[in-house]
Image: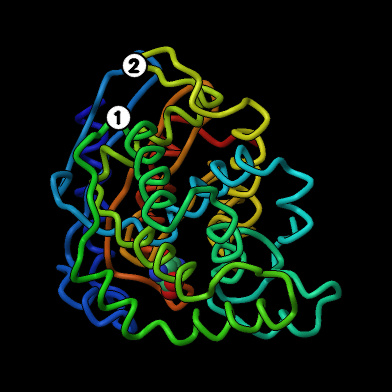
Amino acid sequence: MEQILQKIIDDNRQYTEYGNVATYIPELRKASKNDLGICVVDMDNNIYEAGNCGKKFTIQSVSKPITLALALMDNGKDKVFSKVGMEPSGDPFNSIMKLETSKPSIPYNPMINAGAIMITSMIKGKNNADKLNRMMNFFKNLSGNENLSINEEVYMSEKLTGDRNRAMAYFLRSEGVLTENVEDVLDLYFKQCSIEVTVRDLARIGVNLAYQGVDMLTGKRLMDEEVSKIVKTFMVTCGMYDASGEYAISVGIPSKSGVGGGIMGTVPSKMGIGVFGPSLDEKGNSIAGIKVMESISEKLNLSIF
Ligand code: GLN
């Protein structure tokens, strides 16, 4: 397996030349464009890695399915889906457009920024510190990594420049959809996006999702089976934003991308996959990362379709 992964990295490294690292969050400019790494964790807890697999990067939107799972367990699905829809938007991840025209005025789905901010506002806790603590513990349990922490520079960078997200959140509040304090919600959302991970962390979360929400290492249930099913379905329909359809055809693995360059894949009953390549296409997905996912899906016959 390690040899297969090494070959996949070697074959696809050339694609890191294309695209650009994210710059709209200034701190993300510092990423090294040519990095490319992969980790696979299978159902027997074997770990296989290749490329720049030790590199840390911020989780960004790969966090969205995870906070969705927590919000579903905190509130139940009726409440959650009264505030966020279930349909692909067909628009970029940071689009504002449909918020005003859709009736009711709720975000299309939990994988675009507006929907994810709504989801973050539904995490339960006594105060913001308590909510962050619950959220971090959930990420730590799912990744099996107690040392997960927030990259303070990226967090500050997002907080200082996140006016588009701020605009969406205030709009949702003006509509009475978001009812919490907007700045508190955004602070939590920016922190959630700034959690630092490696491909191994993503692969571990992926394998636990593949295992229907049961932690492979401890046998403990971390989320209800139904919740893990909902989360994986959103990864298929909306996980790669407005490239989700094409990706479902070319890769066919429930996945979630982030502008830090990460992609998390979950292959039901088989494995979790973490990929990192910070150079992005115009939709905000890792170019070489998608190529790597295409290669592994083809070589190991992983498409769920
Ligand atoms: N933190 C980023 C933002 O809110 C996440 C976006 C992404 O990864 N696509 O803009």
On screen, 55 above or below 158?
Answer: above
- Most foreground residue, 214 or 211: 214
- Most foreground residue, 81 or 38: 81
Q: Secondary structure at mark 2?
A: loop
Q: Position of residue 222 (x, y in %)?
A: 49, 26
- Most foreground residue, 76 or 110: 76
Crowd tier of the residue under label 2, counting other residues whose Cα lies within 10 Å: few below 14, some 14–19, many 20 or above:
few
Q: Position of residue 175 (x, y in %)?
A: 74, 79
Marks 1/2 in contact by CB < 8 Å: the verdict is: yes
Crowd tier of the residue under label 1, counting other residues whose Cα lies within 10 Å: few below 14, some 14–19, many 20 or above:
many
Q: Position of residue 231 (x, y in %)?
A: 60, 42
The kind of residue tagged 1 is Gly
- Which numbered marker is on residue 217? 2
On screen, 46 above or below 115?
Answer: above
Q: Is residue 1 left or right of residue 76?
A: left
Quarter of the rendering containing residue 54 = top left
Distance between mark 1 and mark 2 Cα atoms: 8 Å
Which badge, 1 or 2, comes first in the chain's sequence?
Answer: 1
On screen, 80 above or below 191?
Answer: above
On screen, 207 above or below 293?
Answer: above
Q: Secondary structure at mark 1?
A: loop
- Most foreground residue, 251 or 235: 235
Q: Residue at x 31, y 84 (%)?
A: 160
Q: Position of residue 93 (x, y in %)?
A: 54, 72
Q: Is residue 240 visible?
A: yes
- Which numbered marker is on residue 144? 1
